[in-house]
Amino acid sequence: MSAIVAGFLVVLSFITATLSGVFGMAGGLVLMGGLALVLPVSAAFVTHGILQLVANGWRAVLHRKYVDWKIVGIYAAGSLTAGIVVSLIAITPSKPFLYLFMGLLPGLLWLPQSWIRLDAARPGQALLSGLMVTGVNLTAGVAGPLLDIFFVRTALTRHVIVATKAATQVFAHLAKILVYGAPLIAGQGKGLPPWWLFALAIPLSMAGTAVGGVILDRLSDVNFKRWTRLIVTVIGITYLVQAGQLFFHAR
């Protein structure tokens, strides 16, 4: 791995952890797109899972007093089920389809709220979110916008939303590491970044998470939701353009 690529990934880990620390999902989208540019898809999935596991886990620790553990526990049961099912199917998307999936996901945030009857605070729907979000995470690499629609109708504050989403995503990213990491490890880790890159990127992910928390404290609940949708939409459009270019060059 060249020094330029390594430097890119280390800096990206800090920036995306900061974004996730503020909005709870935008960072994951940016990180997955950046990783897919320079790594094979399976390696990008595992690297994304490791870095986001740390970022989300640390964010859950920093905001632990806001975590709704009832939602997290039920979500974890759904996440485990989805992980087992997807591991049996063993599907790895190509890069064009990966960018297409990531580009389409932000469209979920524009669905009229009157159409959405999902609420993660309800036990049955917390279980459904674990199944759906982890399933999409394992096939599209990210699932932040899908997770978000389970929280748009809740009465939770921005701190509880960010903290609870972070705790649930620990399970989703752990599933991704296990499902895609086991075959890579069996093949001597071919395609994965060197261990020293993770040693640099992980502390920066934790630092970015802390910085994001400071910014979150300065946002209002209204601005939090407005900026989340705007930023994720711009990211989605960018990925759709990238997908179109990849499909065109693959012809």
Image: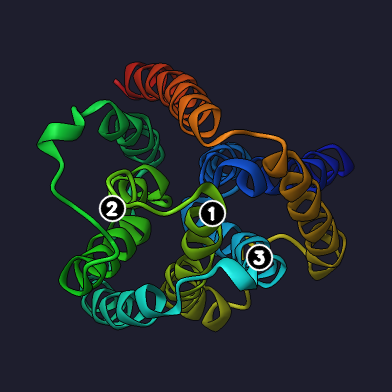
Q: Position of residue 130 (x, y in %)?
A: 29, 69
Look at the numbered disc 1 and give the secondary structure of its residue.
Answer: helix
Q: Nearer the viewer, residue 227 or 190?
A: 227
Task: List the residue tagged with mark 3.
Answer: 63
Distance between the alpha carbons at the discs numbered 2 and 1: 12 Å
Q: Is residue 174 above or below residue 163?
A: below
Q: Position of residue 95 (x, y in %)?
A: 41, 39
Q: Position of residue 235 (x, y in %)?
A: 49, 25
- What amino acid does circle 1 point to? Val
Q: Quadrant of residue 112?
A: top left
Name the disc covering residue 6, or none.
Answer: none
Q: Nearer the viewer, residue 40 or 16?
A: 16
Q: Quadrant of the C terminus?
A: top left
- What amino acid does circle 3 point to? His
Q: Is residue 175 above or below residue 249?
A: below
Q: Is mark 3 in CB contact (under 8 Å) with mark 1? A: yes
Q: Is mark 3 in CB contact (under 8 Å) with mark 2? A: no
Q: Going 35% across and 32% down the picture, which residue do you hit?
A: 106
Q: Earlier in the sequence, mark 2 or mark 1?
A: 2
Distance between the alpha carbons at the discs numbered 3 and 2: 20 Å
Task: List the residue tagged with mark 2.
Answer: 150
Task: List the residue tagged with mark 1.
Answer: 162
Q: Going 42% across and 68% down the picture, which residue do you hit?
A: 172
Distance between the alpha carbons at the discs numbered 3 and 1: 8 Å
Q: Earlier in the sequence, mark 3 or mark 1?
A: 3
Q: Is residue 107 above or below residue 178?
A: above
Q: Going 85% across and 63% down the picture, which residue do you hit?
A: 203
- What amino acid does circle 2 point to? Phe
Q: Is residue 57 above or below residue 204?
A: below
In the figure, is residue 32 to the left or right of 70? right
